[in-house]
Image (cartoon, coloured by chain):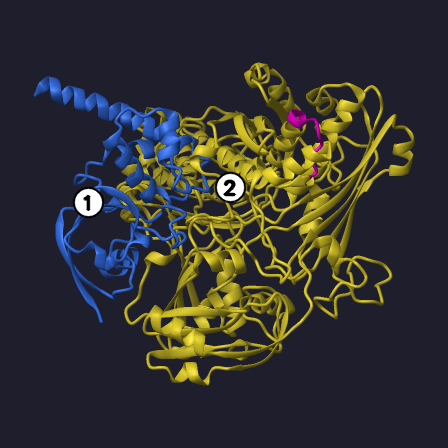
Amino acid sequence: MSVLVSSKINGDDIEFVCEPDETLLDALRDRVGLTGVKEGCGTGDCGACSITLDGALVCSCLVLGAEAEGRKIETVEGMADGDKLHPLQQKFLEHAALQCGICTPGFLVASKTLLEKNPDPTEEEVRYALAGNLCRCTGYDKIVRAVLDAAKQMRKTAKKGKTNG
Amino acid sequence: MGKDTTFKARNFNSVGTRPLRPDGIDKVTGRARYGADFSMPGQLQGCILRSPHAHASIKSIDTSKAEKLKGVKAVVTRKDFITKDADPALLTVLDNCMAGKTAFYDGHAVAAVAAIDAKTAKKALQLIKVEYKVLKHVTDVDEAIKPKAPLIDKKCFTSGVDPKPSKASNIAARSEFGHGDVDKGFEKADVIIERNYKTGQSHQGYIEPHACVASYSPDGTADMWVCTQGHFDFRAQCAGILGMDASKLRVTSSEIGGGFGGKTHLWIEPVTLALSRKANRPVKLVMTRDEVFRASGPTSATSIDVKMGVTKDGTITAAEAELRYTSGPYAGSWARLGAMTAFACYDLDHVKTVGLEVLVNRPKTTAYRAPSAPMAAFAVESMVDELAEHIGMSAVDLRIKNAAKEGTRASYGPVYGPIGIGPTLEAAKNHPHMKVKLGKNQSRGMACGFWFNFGGQSCTDLNIGPDGSATITVGTIDVGGARASLALVVAEELGIPYERVKAVIADTGSLGHNDMTDGSRGTFASSLSAIDSCRMAIAELRNRAAQIWEIDADDVIWENGEAKAISKGAAGNSNREPLSLANLAQSAHKTGGPISGHSQIVADGAGVSFATHICDVEVDKETGQTSIVRYTVIQDAGKAVHPTYVEGQFQGGAAQGIGWALNEEYIYGDDGRLQNPGFLDYRIPVCSDLPMIDTQILEIPNPNHPYGVRGVGETSIVPPLAAIGNAISNAIGVRMTQVPMSPPRILAALNQE
């Protein structure tokens, strides 16, 4: 029988109904309409369905919809502040860090989680943090550059915020 | 209006700049809609039942229990599709999408279900009873051509052989290319090497699985939304298979999550359409990753014999190869492409290549980025390195000495115009990468690559908006930045800012036929057509200005986005204030209505493409693990319309080649079943596997395009297999002859020493 799930998705209180064996990925896409979350494999190998669950980076294909009860979910759809893109989104565009773009939502969510934990990562740290996300188009070069550049800008903004505040 | 294909050296304002792509914001915010992101009201879910056997005849299919399951709205098998009076080529396409009397590979579709939800559809699949008679199978290319190999097709008599063979075999076709007399050439050689090389079967590995929504209406018309590299071809083939008029099927291409050639072929689309027709409801069908690996995609597995001869001073006197490529259960032209590209980089007096298309019980071979060229290049470029070593010449100098140039007769027939193989080699020789000191267990390799680049049919509309902005409507889908490139070309031609141009990809009901985005043709062919459309609109804009000024249209020129009067005919014209595109668009309703241009072309004269790659590896001799330490791509792009996306194509192709060289391979068990149909076991490179990939764009203009554009997408996957093979061979002192050069193979090679 179906399950009623209440969770906070991208800041909004959302209720959805799903089957007990339905993945959170399917629930987000088919029930909540958040198709920015992509399915590339359904087995946790490609990272296209990356979201955060209470701040932790997860593959939403490996989580049940029912497990989202009472929890906080962030997806790519929640990254921009209105029409103001998140610095990572802006840098992905500037560096052409996407070609086909199907992996981009997962990369953005994974990169955001990385920079929240480590605002000043080395190239190697970026590469290992994003090793769970597959991209077949770019060879990762421009993705890594975009993340490093976004980190730099976010540090600058944070510093400015501190001095001003 | 005839198309202008002549290159004229010029300064560019827009082309060659690096603006943000127009579809970018949708793609970083999750708003862009890919194949699986589209849904229709009342939509059913489709699922496909697939053969678990590598080779089996289908005795019977009982769908009655599945049909009776609550929630099931349609079940289809082969009998729901056309069988007679159809084009044989189309029947082959259909046979791969839905098996007839025989299941030819593990994963071959045998039946499909549409139900109210995925769960019900999957349950219904388990209720379909298929009676198979398992047949002997063969998956290995060299096993398949042995006299006693199980026959895939009893009516397969090798084509391209005179006289036609009387005995059936698994060799579907033979092709031959070359010129001169190789025996004579080998007589002049001081060193002759012969070797066999093998490459594993790789998959394009696009992250987006195939997905499609089809809605067949009782009035006989239908709509389809699909991720494809060529919606016009999908329309033609689906309509043919379903027995419809092509014009009654409207296909809209979604955003595409990678294709690399794999989305130029039909897989689930006719099945989805047949389910919709039978259920009388829209149907959505999305492949799982397992299905993507088992039933779509892969490139050929190959076995290639090469023989080359060289003089002590470094002249390659003769080159010969027999290239055997698997094509799955159906004839293809994959070995043919291998045979054409193998020696394309070199200026040879005596050259001969033979390609054999080999039928096996693997999924149908399909195009994968510069299809067939990487394997041939692995064999030939590995041997070129070995020849250099034997005569004590550097690998780069031997290549420079024998490189093809303008006027060279290519090994596959034509005589080259201006080409970039020499310049990429010179650039490689002088590249800082060549001078970087190597660390412990590190070694360097290089290799060259070639791809033809395609032209073909393109059709575009250019519409000037009432505010003087422009829309370019094309029929070639955008795999990774084409809309940005085409908007730049239109901005250049009209003389308006890039931001004022919108590039739109039309559905099949809105433009004439366009060939697929394949063969690196998208930007080349559609820009050629877009330029023609612009020029037609400019002619009209000059007429409108002439009308307003009451002068002759010949006295109006178009410059920097404005109509200007010149004093050719009447004195004093040049005193007139120029009329901008916006001025003319605003007054269009008084001067003859909307302003537009249209073009339909067969784009001839795609410029061939060459690349040279340099690669540094570090090999762990204890584990056999190879790390790529440094990588450089040097490629002739012709004019680079949007250099950032050109670099992206160079880097992406290199990364795919690196994966193929080191890890990627279809692994079959003795039972003929694919053992690694997932990203965990079919391991494509991840971020931590790769270094930054350095790029150098050379711009040798293509004389057959007004801006000098060639095509850039594919050549970058051609050299990596050999570049890495050469680097590893240099590192471990053993010649690697089999791809992928996975840790166990490297250890085996070391142990053989």
Q: Do the residues at pointers 1 and 2 share their chain? A: no
The reply, left or right, for residue B347 in relation to residue B688 is: right
| Span of residues in magenta | B730-737
Spot occupied by residue B217 in the image (x, y as percentages of width and height): 37, 75
> Which secondary structure dominates the residues rendered in magenta?
loop
Neighbor class of circle 2 (other Cα within 10 Å; few <14, some 14-19, many 20+) is: many
| Quadrant of residue B18 within the rendered picture | top left
In the rendered image, residue B562, in percent from the top left (x then y), is placed at 35, 32
Does the magenta run of residues contain B133? Answer: no
Is residue B735 rendered magenta in the image?
A: yes
Residue under the image location 75 percent in, 19 percent down:
B393
Q: Chain of mark 2?
A: B
Residue B152 seen by the camera: yes
Q: Which mark is residue A54?
A: 1
Chain A visual colour: blue
Is the C terminus of chain B in the top left, top right, bottom left or bottom right quadrant? top right
- Label the yellow chain with its letter: B
Is A141 situated above or below B88?
above
Question: In the image, is residue B121 above or below residue B748?
Answer: below
According to the picture, the residue beneath numbered tag 2 turns out to be B528
Crowd band around label 1 with a 10 angstrom C-alpha radius: few (<14), some (14–19), many (20+): some
Viewer-side label of 1, 2: 1
